[in-house]
């Protein structure tokens, strides 16, 4: 097994601030915008961005939710390991809101497809954008592309891209792992 | 643990503690789903479920049907009273005919003990027991424990009293198994004639005095007297039963604590429980009904997960 560092914590720090600025560019004071972290791994990125927007750019009342897509996936009964659900926490309605989906790695696009269905249970957003830290180019199964992206990588299918967050995994880093 | 240890839900007796924890954890997610404005998820859109009821039911049947629909399964309903069973068809033939229409899961209620168990050995489908005679009613026991857990934080170490017709009650037996697995203390209370002779071998204690029993417990699960299963008189009159074992507000107010009141339904108001108790803030009867849908969604979801594509 080989493990290569794609991004270190300093690079992640710079990227997060850039992504925050890009969000501000499009959403101003976030009055009509909600951020939705996709469970399980997207919530760390979403929370980090929300705190940067609040603390470094003085944007108050950011609305942040967590969306679990387990029950909306298209691979139920088609995988070896059973799916395990996570918590959905959305305490606002998304009707007529601008929704930004936030996830760590965009791979096949199927999670985002599921999230697009899942969010409909909470109303009809005026539009939906996608923000990802890592975009695995050339591996898409569906016509889904990010609006905001941290870093684009070309990796082969056997390689795995994992994002570590200091809140959970002791330090910020992105690795490419080859088994 | 993210998979059940069993292939069918025939009774709580076959489950372990990890199964119950998994069902509750999954039900938590579904409870959140059914409280959304759009209460439906598409997980089971390619699964077909048949509800076959050889005995009357309102709550359980509606609850299963709703759970199945909330999961986007296709549902067919079958009541024995309107079917070829009346023309002499056997259980296996009836079910195999239903299965040849490509059904994946059977939810069955049957007046005979062990009917679901028997079926699971003879047909190729997932079986969920929705009550078999006086034997087990696993989803009811799961939703009862789930409701206790929701109200009191945990089932472990809680003192649960089951009052009434223990002899004919599948709810009582399934509850005893489920509560035992989770480490609760259990006492039963009722007329001597309606307490099974060897009930203590299940690890429960008996109390014939309702006041003493209520003084002891944190939760009282009040059962209905099942007149339809009684071929002889087990007690002199309904009035006497109600005076000796009926739970009323006066009795509850005489306790020095606020206990939780449960009832699996249907309620015979004024017999085992008075209206002011059933409708009081101590009663979680309607919460039980709501939780029933979430629990049944969880059970169906977890069993459906095992059906390979």
Image (cartoon, grey):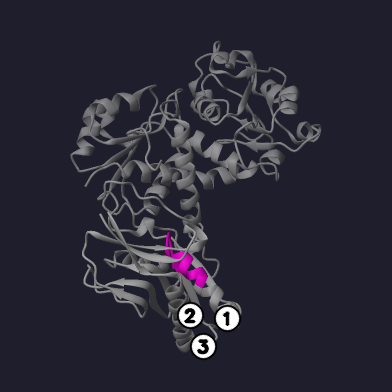
The residue where tag 2 is placed is A17
Up-down relation of residue B146 to residue A108 (above or below): above
The residue where tag 3 is placed is A28
Give residue A3's mark.
Answer: none
| Span highlighted in magenta in the image | A37-48
Which residue is drawn at the image coordinates 27% and 29% (left, top)?
B85
Q: Position of residue B307 (x, y in %)?
A: 26, 42
SS assignment at label 1: loop
Q: Is residue B264 left or right of residue B46?
A: right
Q: Is residue B184 left or right of residue A170?
A: right
Numbered disc total? 3
SS assignment at label 2: helix
Cβ atoms at labels 1 and 3 below 8 Å apart: no
Tell whether position A64 is magenta: no
In which quadrant of the rendered view does residue A154 lie? Answer: bottom left
The residue where tag 1 is placed is A56
Which residue is drawn at the image coordinates 73% and 33% (left, top)?
B248
Cβ atoms at labels 2 and 1 below 8 Å apart: yes
Q: Position of residue A107 (x, y in %)?
A: 29, 67
SS assignment at label 3: loop
In which quadrant of the rendered view does residue A118 lie? Answer: bottom left
Tell which residue pokes out farthest to the left in this image.
B100
Badges 3 and 2, same chain? yes
The quarter of the picture where the N terminus of chain A appears is bottom left
**Mark 1 or 3, nearer chain start:** 3
Around disc 1, counting alpha carbons within 10 Å, would you say few (fewer than 14), some (14 to 19), or many (20 or more)? few
């Amino acid at each position: 097994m080989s493990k290569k560092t794609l991004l270190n914590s300093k690079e992640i720090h710079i990227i997060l601030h850039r992504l925050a600025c890009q969000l501000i560019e499009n959403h101003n004071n976030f009055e009509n915008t909600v951020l939705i972290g996709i469970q399980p791994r997207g919530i760390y990125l979403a929370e980090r961005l929300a705190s940067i927007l609040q603390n470094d750019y003085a944007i108050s009342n950011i609305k942040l939710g967590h969306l679990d897509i387990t029950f909306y996936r298209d691979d139920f009964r088609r995988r070896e390991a059973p799916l395990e659900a996570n918590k959905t926490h959305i305490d606002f309605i998304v009707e007529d809101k601008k929704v930004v989906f936030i996830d760590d790695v965009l791979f096949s696009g199927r999670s985002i497809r599921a999230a697009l269905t899942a969010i409909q249970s909470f109303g009809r957003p005026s539009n939906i954008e996608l923000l990802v830290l890592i975009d695995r180019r050339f591996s898409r199964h569906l016509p889904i592309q990010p609006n905001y992206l941290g870093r684009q990588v070309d990796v082969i299918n056997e390689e795995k891209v994992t994002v570590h967050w200091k809140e959970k995994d002791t330090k910020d880093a992105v690795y490419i792992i080859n088994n | 643990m993210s998979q059940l240890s069993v292939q069918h839900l025939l009774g709580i007796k076959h489950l372990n503690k990890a199964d119950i924890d998994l069902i509750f954890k999954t039900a938590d997610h579904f409870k959140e789903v059914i409280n959304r404005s759009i209460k439906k998820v598409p997980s089971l859109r390619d699964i077909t479920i048949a509800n076959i009821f050889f005995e009357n039911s309102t709550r359980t049947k509606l609850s299963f049907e709703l759970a199945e629909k909330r999961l986007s399964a296709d549902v067919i309903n079958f009541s024995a009273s309107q079917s070829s069973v009346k023309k002499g068809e056997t259980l296996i033939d009836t079910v195999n005919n239903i299965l040849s229409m490509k059904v994946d899961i059977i939810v069955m209620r049957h007046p005979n003990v062990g009917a679901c168990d028997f079926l699971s050995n003879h047909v190729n489908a997932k079986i969920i027991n929705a009550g078999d005679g006086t034997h087990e009613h696993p989803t009811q026991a799961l939703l009862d424990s789930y409701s206790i857990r929701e109200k009191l934080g945990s089932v472990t170490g809680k003192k649960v009293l089951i009052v009434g017709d223990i002899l004919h009650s599948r709810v009582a037996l399934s509850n005893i198994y489920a509560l035992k697995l989770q480490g609760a203390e259990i006492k039963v209370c009722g007329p001597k004639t309606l307490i099974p002779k060897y009930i203590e071998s299940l690890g429960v204690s008996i109390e014939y005095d309702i006041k003493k029993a209520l003084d002891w417990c944190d939760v009282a699960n009040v059962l209905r007297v099942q007149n339809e299963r009684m071929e002889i008189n087990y007690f002199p009159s309904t009035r006497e039963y109600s005076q000796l074992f009926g739970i009323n507000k006066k009795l509850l107010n005489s306790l020095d604590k606020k206990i939780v009141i449960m009832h699996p339904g249907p309620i015979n108001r004024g017999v085992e429980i008075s209206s002011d108790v059933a409708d009081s803030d101590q009663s979680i009867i309607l919460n039980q009904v709501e939780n029933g849908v979430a629990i049944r969604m969880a059970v169906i979801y977890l069993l459906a997960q095992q059906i390979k594509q």
